[in-house]
């Protein structure tokens, strides 16, 4: 069963200014929570940017990667991030946080269905929540990026490359990727 992604709960890690979360909220009306380093100034900045974009302030969780997570049972279906592979020394902590979010996930509202993502080649990939969808545009050495992805796989996560610097990461036990070639017709979902 396909559920439009606007009905899923999103969690944006390394939110920074909140630009990605604000865009997703405005463009697709998704239910999204922001998160970044445990720093009040970051939270204030995201709040300011929400108001500047005529949005109610988005929920925010202060969290430093690798520290105990302040929510015991996360219920976000889609964890999303952009440009998070900047700090090689933090990869282990990032893997620890992503692993917690995916492995401790408890579905809210008993919805069942798949997230459909169309990759660069036009292949549609359906995945069961929870998933971590990430991209980055900054130049990072191949050796450095593999440290993060290898770390994910060592903790039992599955990494799937979707296109130019776009990855889908999920719990191997829950992974249920189904690939179909798009016929060019319309479909709801995320396109990368």
Image (cartoon, helix red, strand yellow):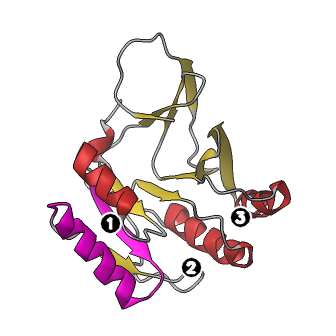
Question: As drawn, is 43 to the left or to the right of 38?
Answer: left
Which span of residues is magenta-colored?
A: 31-55
Describe residue 172's horizontal placement relative to residue 191 as left or right.
Answer: right
Alpha carbon separation for disc pair 3 and 2: 16 Å
Q: Position of residue 83 (x, y in %)?
A: 57, 60
In contact (CB < 8 Å): disc 1 and disc 2: no
Measuring 64% from the left and 39% from the top, which residue is drawn there?
Answer: 164
Instruction: Name the residue at 47% across, 53% down.
Output: 130
Report if residue 50 lies within the magenta region: yes
The label shown at residue 155 is 3
- The residue pinned by badge 2 equals 65
Q: If you read the primary sequence from the N terminus, does the residue marked by circle 3 or circle 2 appear first?
A: 2
Q: Nearer the viewer, residue 153 or 188?
A: 188
Please name the residue shown 51% across and 35% down the image: 192
Of helix, strand and loop, which one carries label 2?
loop
- State the separation of the CA atoms marked 1 and 2: 16 Å
* Mark before the other along the chain sequence, 1 or 2: 1
Q: Is residue 39 above or below residue 153?
A: below
Where's residue 122, x and y in %?
Answer: 54, 21
Q: Which residue is mark 1?
A: 33
Image coords of residue 149 (percent x, y):
73, 57
**Closer to us: 81 or 95:** 81
Q: Dot 3: few (<14), some (14–19), or many (≥20) neighbours within 10 Å?
A: some
Residue 106 shows up from this direction: no
Q: Is residue 17 left or right of residue 143?
A: left
- Element class at badge 3: loop
Pair 3/2: label in front: 2
In-front residue for pair 120/3: 120
Residue contact between numbered discs 3 and 2, judged by CB atoms under 8 Å: no
């Amino acid at each position: 069963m396909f559920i439009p992604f606007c009905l899923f709960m999103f969690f944006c890690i390394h939110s920074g200014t909140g630009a990605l979360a604000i865009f997703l909220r405005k463009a697709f009306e998704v239910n999204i929570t922001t998160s970044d380093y445990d720093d009040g100034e970051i939270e204030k900045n995201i709040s300011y940017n929400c108001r500047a974009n005529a949005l109610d302030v988005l929920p925010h969780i202060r969290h430093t990667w690798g520290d105990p997570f302040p929510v015991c049972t996360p219920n976000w279906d889609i964890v999303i991030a952009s440009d998070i592979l900047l700090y090689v020394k933090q990869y282990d902590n990032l893997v620890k946080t992503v692993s917690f979010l995916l492995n401790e996930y408890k579905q809210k509202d008993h919805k069942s269905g798949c997230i459909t993502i169309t990759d660069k080649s036009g292949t549609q990939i359906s995945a069961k929540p929870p998933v971590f969808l990430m991209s980055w545009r900054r130049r990072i050495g191949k050796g450095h990026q593999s440290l993060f992805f290898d770390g994910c796989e060592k903790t039992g996560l599955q990494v799937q490359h979707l296109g130019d610097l776009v990855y889908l990461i999920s719990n191997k036990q829950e992974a249920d990727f189904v690939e179909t070639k798009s016929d060019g017709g319309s479909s709801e979902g995320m396109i990368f």
